[in-house]
Amino acid sequence: MRIGELSRVTGVSLRSLRYYEVKGLLAADREENGYRIYNATAIERVNTIQFYLRLGFSTDEIEGFLNCVMKNKEAFCEEILPMYEQKLAEIDRQLHQLGQIRSNLVERMEAIRREQESKASGQ
């Protein structure tokens, strides 16, 4: 199938598909006219890439385990569990940081409201 059809079937932009090819995540043969031709496994491969992107992995990270996952089940890929653990730790750090930012914003809002109330009652 050509790149346009792969894009339509997967819902992934042409630009992203070309990027995956540059990154080595997706391979295409070329016709004599230079058009990309993808084999039948391209749909599954693109859907798998999208799945891992939604989990928060970068294309560089996905590159490290994609071939294994495409050939085996996740459970049989030694690379995947440490990457999941690392990603989860990263998310936990981000959640902690967001919690601190939220607390700071709540404190600031309360301080502003107290000041406005004080000013309004003093007038």
Image: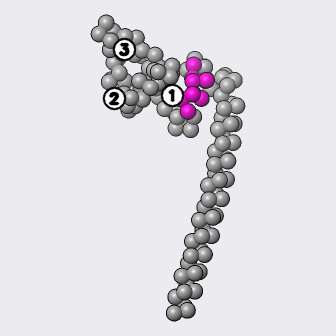
Q: Amino acid at mark 1?
A: Thr
Q: Residue at x 60, y 61 (%)?
A: 102
Q: Amino acid at mark 3?
A: Ile
Q: Is residue 95 above or below residue 43?
A: below
Q: Position of residue 34 (x, y in %)?
A: 33, 12
- Name the residue furthest top: 32
Q: Amino acid at mark 2?
A: Arg
Q: Is residue 83 in view?
A: yes
Q: CA distance from mark 1 to mark 2?
A: 16 Å
Provide the residue designation for mark 3.
Answer: 37
Q: Which mark is residue 58?
A: none
Left or right relative to 70: residue 10: left
Residue 70 on the magenta segment:
no
Q: Position of residue 71 (x, y in %)?
A: 57, 17
> In front: mark 1 or mark 3?
3
The magenta stretch is 58-67
Q: CA distance from mark 1 to mark 3?
A: 19 Å
